[in-house]
Image: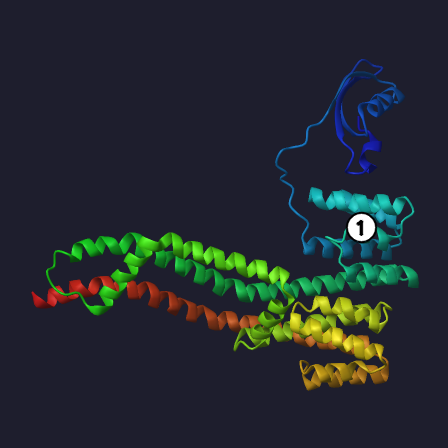
Amino acid sequence: MAIAASKNKTSEKPVFTYEARTKEGRVIKGEMAAFNDTVVRAEIRRLGMTLIRVKRKAKPLFSSSKPVQPRDIATFARQLATMMTAGLPIVQALDIIAQSAEKKTMKDLINEVKNDVESGTNLADALDRHRKYFDELFVNLVRAGEQSGALEVVLDRIATYKEKTESLKGKIKKALFYPTAVLVVAFIVTAILLIFVIPQFESLFQGFGADLPAFTQFVIGLSDLFREYWYWIFGGIAAVIFLFVFVKRRSDRFNHFLDRMILKLPIFGPLMEKSAIARFARTLSTMFSAGVPLVEALPPTAGATGNAVFRDAVMSMRDLVSAGSPLRIGMQQSNLFPVMVIQMVAIGEETGALDNMLAKVADMYEEEVDNMVDAMSSLLEPMIMAFLGIVVGGLVIAMYLPIFKLGAVV
């Protein structure tokens, strides 16, 4: 027998396991979420059963539930938009989404939002209580949708926006992950060869009684350095990574400097620039089409660009727009946006179709990012293979040079 009341309680209530005997004498076991065991006993009596035992269920020491990811939030927005467009009440839609959620953390999150809405809180405020998962942009769009009476339309736009931005992030990660992973593997392989393999050849060469080639001597010296100071080398690398992450999280000036340097890189710079423009256009188009005033839409848009240089520029644009200047003037003064993008924004402002023009800009730049990632993957793969061949092959050649020299003498 299932206890229906246990399904719609908040996830904060403890869970109790119980055994009870029905009027027919059949013993059943079950679980119930309640504030205490007194509530469980009362519910069992109300159902006409005799309680045998009740015990609070212990929480597991280690939770196996996966954390909520941005893609989960995008899926949630799409499901909620679809159900509300179909005419379902928001509470019922949230309940259905919660029941179908695969992750326990996502199920609990949606249930908490549903309980808040059920108690009279509007959806925007209910989402605002979970800023870890629903950012300022998401909450502001939902609030605008509730105020305009077109929540299902806004939710559909949010879902599209989330899906496209997550797709764009995935492409950028794909472009950066492959070379980074190969460089890490190359360093590890090189370190293993220098620490464990090269010393074996060094002991062999000591019996040759002849001078070793300069390249071989250099590699042996590098091996001795690694073996003697390996803890300093690896510790230093770990310290640099930790310091980099620490400063990046706490220094806006460092982030601004780093993002500016990234934009100047020969290969990744244009990719990151196009990505930032695509995010800017997609975010601003989504917010403006949802009825958010331009001045209020620019701060969340600044944070969504993913680059400190573009973020500061968009905030400067906000100041100009607040003073009455058109958006295109602020974009011109930033010196970050191509002329074509500024002209499309100008046309959008003149025709009253700014959101549509920004959406076209976003589509165009997202396609360019996609093409650049594919081109970079095709270009980097042979270059990385050649790099690995030079590094590992160079070490092998250095070890076999004395053997070749000895064979030539014999």
Residue 254 seen in render: yes
Q: Residue at x 81, y 69 (%)?
A: 297
Q: Residue at x 84, y 59 (%)?
A: 142
Q: Residue at x 62, y 39 (%)?
A: 64
- Residue at the extreme left: 410
The residue to which callout 1 is attached is 129
Q: Nearer the viewer, residue 52 or 297?
A: 297
Q: Is residue 63 left or right of residue 156?
A: left
Residue 370 seen in render: no
Label 1, secondary structure: give it. loop
- Whole-percent x, y for residue 145 in the image: 87, 62
Q: Quadrant of residue 232?
A: bottom left
- Whole-percent x, y for residue 89 in the image: 89, 50
Q: Nearer the viewer, residue 114 or 128?
A: 128
- Whole-percent x, y for residue 303 in the image: 71, 66
Q: Establish if 59 lies above or below 410.
A: above
Labels in figure, total: 1
- Which corner quadrant holds the C terminus? bottom left
Q: Establish if 392 lies above or below 263.
A: above
- Whole-percent x, y for residue 337 in the image: 68, 81
The type of residue carrying mark 1 is Arg
- Residue at the extreme top: 25
Q: Quadrant of residue 385?
A: bottom left
Colour scheme in use: rainbow
- Which corner quadrant holds the N terminus? top right
